[in-house]
Amino acid sequence: MSILYSQISYIIIYMNGLGERIKSLRLENNYTQPQLAEKLNVSNAVISFWENNVNEPKATYIRMIAECFSVSTDYLLGLEDESGARTATQINNLSHFNNSGTIKF
């Protein structure tokens, strides 16, 4: 379990665009920040922090956001594009791991 957590943490730390994807999806679906906050049972400030990359949602919220907007969690995390194809970012980030789950530099 810790190997998987290390890999996921590494991907999340180095990914770009989670906040931008949340904001874009919110706007595409005509939600205001307060409306999305109510739907996810968080404060308006939390939505703002996520969208401005001040902090990142926990895994449970990533899943809820994905379900709310009918997208995959991989899409939210930047691991796949709108068509479901894997992105180069994911491939490059995973190349830093060896078979034991540790980061190699």
Image (cartoon, grey):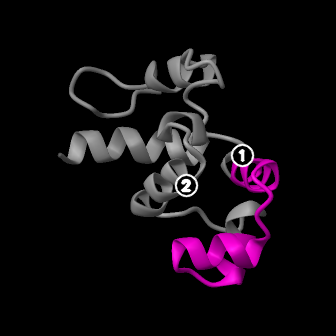
Position of 90 with respect to 102 (left or right) is right
Residue that numbered label 1 is attached to: 21
* Residue 93 pos. (x, y %): 52, 26
**42 vs 65: above or below:** below
Q: How crowded is mark 2: few (under 14 residues within 10 Å), some or many (20 or more)?
A: some
Disc nearer the start of the sequence (1/2): 1
Residue depicted at 73% across the width and 79% down the height: 34
Q: Give the range drawn in magenta.
A: 19-48
Mark carried by residue 68: 2
Q: Which of 50 and 36 is in front in this view?
A: 36
**52 vs 8: above or below:** below
* Residue 49 pos. (x, y %): 71, 71
* Residue 74 pos. (x, y %): 50, 34
Mark carried by residue 48: none
The reply to whether the C-beta atoms of the residues labelled 1 and 2 are less than 8 Å apart is: no
**Circle 1: residue type:** Arg
**10 vs 35: above or below:** above
Position of 29 with respect to 82 (left or right) is right
| Dot 1: element | helix
